[in-house]
Image: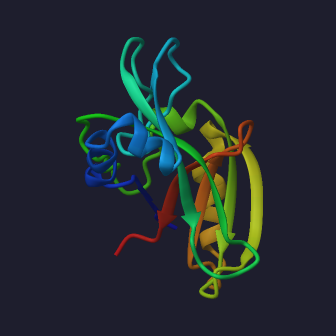
Amino acid sequence: MSFQINALPEAFAARLFALSDEALAEIPAKKITVDTNPGFPCRVSLADAEVGETVILVHYVHQPHNTPYKASHAIFVRQGVTQATPTVGEVPKALEMRVLSVRAFNGSHDMIDADVVDGEMAADSIRRMFKNPEVAYLHLHNAKPGCFAASVTRPY
């Protein structure tokens, strides 16, 4: 069973970096200078930011649907990066090197399956979940901090 990991669009980060610090604080969001690598995984590039880079830590609604599973968390984005486009079946290194929570949602946006795996085993967990025809899409989260990492869909 094939899958496609999806990054956030470049425009999402570009809009944030165009804002003043005061405007960011209202979102809420803030600029941070990266002081360690790995440690600041960007949801646009699906790669960790380099030491010295400025990232924005922003409150992000990753599950906007009006269900009990509606959810949000803080995520990092980098400036001036290209949106990652992993190949079908590819798990990017920044995800592969972390412990991931894999969450399966149906067409009504209810969670119907979940797993916690070492990132190196994420592809197996994703494929297993997509064998269930009720699964419409998946969300990956970095399991330790709990933050949204990427969405996963069936390739078309």
Q: Residue at x 73, y 73 (%)?
A: 111
66 vs 3, nearest the viewer: 66
Residue 149 position in % (x across, y down): 55, 47
- The colour scheme applied to this rendered structure is rainbow
Vertical relation: 100 (above or below) 39? below
Residue 94 position in % (x across, y down): 49, 33
Q: Is residue 38 left or right of residue 55?
A: right
142 vs 92, nearest the viewer: 142
87 vs 24, nearest the viewer: 24
Vertical relation: 89 (above or below) 63? above
Which quarter of the image is occupied by the C terminus? Answer: bottom left
Vertical relation: 71 (above or below) 132? above
Residue 132 position in % (x across, y down): 66, 78
Residue 1 position in % (x across, y down): 52, 67
Q: Residue at x 44, y 37 (%)?
A: 42
As drawn, the residue found furthest toward the front would be 22
Q: Is residue 10 left or right of residue 111?
A: left
Q: Is residue 151 left or right of residue 133?
A: left
Q: Residue at x 33, y 46 (%)?
A: 13
Q: Within the image, what quadrant is residue 44 found in? A: top left
Vertical relation: 135 (above or below) 41? below
Q: Within the image, what quadrant is residue 52 found in? A: top left
Q: Residue at x 71, y 45 (%)?
A: 146
